[in-house]
Image (spheres, rainbow, N blue to C red):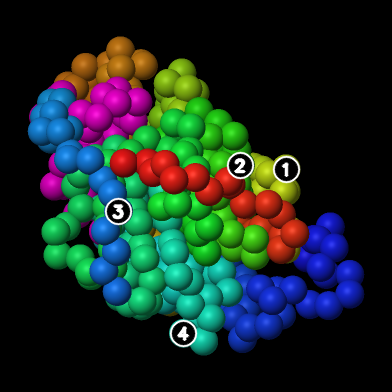
Amino acid sequence: MDSNDPASSSTTPRDSLSDYKFSFESYLDYASKIEIDSNPRTHFTLDTASIAESIYEFHKENGRTYHAYRAGSYHYPNDALEVERQDAQYDILKILLDGRAYLSPFSQENPPQKVLDIATGSGSWAIDMGDEYPEARIVGTDLSPIQSDLVPPNVEFIVDDATDEWPNGRDWCDFDLIHTRVTMGCWSDMGTQVIKPAFDHLRPGGWMECQELMGLLECDDETVTNANAFKRWCDDIVDASYAADRPLPLAANLKQWFIEAGFVDVEEKVYKLPVNGWPRNRRLKKLGELWHANIEEGLQALSYGLLHRFKRRTKEEIEVDLINVRKDLADERMHGYQKFYVVCGRKPEYAQSASLTDSTMW
């Protein structure tokens, strides 16, 4: 726990982690060495302006579609295939977190009233939160209007770019929880573009939670080498992301960014997510098999934008390379995993919220 919050020096803050039954200790110790399988195989309406038809005029490239609003700032597709993959990804990560959508200290006894999901994607997380807390107001923002219309009445999706300056209108202040999940590739500087403005727009005592994937391929033995095509693909994607000024390996910096923004009670948990079914542990094996399927389904989506735009590779060249990538990804002699970070932090009770004005965002 961070002791910089004056409230913690005398009495326990109202929103202290110790007040709730929730515990970060509920997660399995995924950050330790994984044993190898020896036998592999209330309705709120924001004052929004009418959405221009142009945001639905998605850009088409190499057979995939991409967002129209702020076109080119995000290099991954928004079509039905990608929405389906994102939904499956959300389900896998919930399994990783023992069925939880969040680790921040909220519950039916301590429900959030106002929640913001930044870069909501398919909107699965926001919809789950709307179902769990029907009296809360849940807002999801994204560059693409690709979310389902079948949502709880307390959930609203808005086309917005979080890298813009955040407004101080009444609709945009005093959030109880601000959340991101797998937003790597969205930001040039997540610390200043997202985490600091999120801090400013939380209510005192409110929480921010970021659940982010590093994107690098790692292992605890010597089974992942540069001879592995999936390893080379990961390195190429990361290199291209830096060229795009949207670096993928941001998760390891989250805790420091939280502290620099002013958060206290900052907690970080790091999970290992196997990339195929190589672990002996049945739960990790199943997670690895699911994650392998999700990566495989996303290889094309993750490759086309970055490798075509920043590595000058043609669609045909990319597809030829992906043949070996898929082969090596499935090889359970390769004991690879990707790190998944969950970082939570609380805005101190004494901290000032963003100023309320009569202006609104929309």
Instruction: Compare marks 3 and 1 and give the one earlier in the sequence.
Output: 3
In the rendered image, which quarter contains the N terminus?
bottom right
Instruction: Compare marks 4 and 3 and give the one earlier in the sequence.
Output: 3
Image mark for residue 196: 2
Give me the C-alpha separation between circle 4 and circle 2: 28 Å
Determine the image quadrant of residue 234: top left
Instruction: Compare marks 1 and 4 and give the one earlier in the sequence.
Output: 4
- Mark 2 crowdedness (10 Å alpha carbons): few <14, some 14-19, many ≥20: some
In the picture of the structure, the residue carrying the numbered disc 3 is 46
Instruction: Compare marks 3 and 2 and give the one earlier in the sequence.
Output: 3
Looking at the rendering, the stretch of residues picked out in magenta corresponds to 61-87
Give me the C-alpha separation between circle 3 and circle 1: 31 Å
Give me the C-alpha separation between circle 1 and circle 4: 31 Å
Disc 4 or disc 3, which is closer to the eye? 3
Q: Residue at x 48, y 68 (%)?
A: 102
Q: Is residue 33 above or below residue 313?
A: below
Q: Residue at x 31, y 41 (%)?
A: 362
Image mark for residue 260: 1
- Mark 3 crowdedness (10 Å alpha carbons): few <14, some 14-19, many ≥20: some
Q: For numbered disc 4, what is the local secondary structure? A: loop
Determine the image quadrant of residue 206: bottom right
What type is the residue that disc 2 sits on? Answer: Lys
What type is the residue that disc 3 sits on? Answer: Leu
Report if the CB atoms under discs 2 and 1 are less than 8 Å apart: yes
* Viewer-proximal residue among 145 and 256: 145
Q: Is residue 157 above or below residue 133?
A: above
In the picture of the structure, the residue carrying the numbered disc 4 is 108
Determine the image quadrant of residue 360: top left
Q: Is residue 74 magenta?
A: yes
